[in-house]
């Protein structure tokens, strides 16, 4: 009998597992840009624990193991900044990243009054860009950070719909086919 993946709010007890998973997941990004000094690879456990206390951190669990995570905060104008969406390499390409993104968006809207979502990724991170576009995010800017790295910022507005009325798929989203 298999164990299903559950998504919930992270606790302080998850910090070490999240940090180890973050280190594993960002190796691929570091190799892509030939930069092993990126912040996700140098973040300390103390800094991560501070993020757990200040922001909204969600985890995906397979049994007791943390196999995914995402973080978000909301600023005074209602813009949610989503960061460090990670999924264990053996669990990728099964929809878990999208589920985590949906979960953090819902929490940030319900508990912190988010009205817009913003995130960023590297210009060569095609899988990330594909996921974000499929979830309704659109590029709003690009910033050259290093000679090898440009960061693409993507945003989407919170969609509201009448009770009982399904929302129309936004650009980049696909309606389910029966």
Image: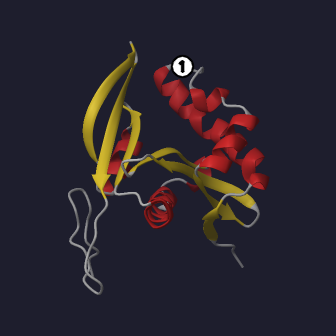
Label 1 sits on a secondary structure element that is loop
Residue at 40% across, 57% down: 114
**In x, y percent, where is residue 137?**
30, 50
Determine whether, in the image, residue 95 is placed left or right of residue 142: right
Residue 140 in the image: above or below residue 6: above
Residue 9 in the image: above or below residue 42: below
**In x, y percent, where is residue 152?**
33, 33
Residue at 58% across, 56% down: 91
Q: In this view, which residue lies farthest toward the top?
A: 147
Which residue is label 1 attached to? 35
Residue at 28% across, 70% down: 160
**In x, y percent, where is residue 111?**
50, 64
The colour mode here is secondary structure
Q: Where, by quadrant of the figure, is residue 59 drawn?
A: bottom right
Determine whether, in the image, residue 80 is placed left or right of residue 14: left
Closer to the camera in the image, 56 or 43? 56
Quadrant (top left, top right, bottom left, bottom right) of the N terminus? bottom right
């Amino acid at each position: 009998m298999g164990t299903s993946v559950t998504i919930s709010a992270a606790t302080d007890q998850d910090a070490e597992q999240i940090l180890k998973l973050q280190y594993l997941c960002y190796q691929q990004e570091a190799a892509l840009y030939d930069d092993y000094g990126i912040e996700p690879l140098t973040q300390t456990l103390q800094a991560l624990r501070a993020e757990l206390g200040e922001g909204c951190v969600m985890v995906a669990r397979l049994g007791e193991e943390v196999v995914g995570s995402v973080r978000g905060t909301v600023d005074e104008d209602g813009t949610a900044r989503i960061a460090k969406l990670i999924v264990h390499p053996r669990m990728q390409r099964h929809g878990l990243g999208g589920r985590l993104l949906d979960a953090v968006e819902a929490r940030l809207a319900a508990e912190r009054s988010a009205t817009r979502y913003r995130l960023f990724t590297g210009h060569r991170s095609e899988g990330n860009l594909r996921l974000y576009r499929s979830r309704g995010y659109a590029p709003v800017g690009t910033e050259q950070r290093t000679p090898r790295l440009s960061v693409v910022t993507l945003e989407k507005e919170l969609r509201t719909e009448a009770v009982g009325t399904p929302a129309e798929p936004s650009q980049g989203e696909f309606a389910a086919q029966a």
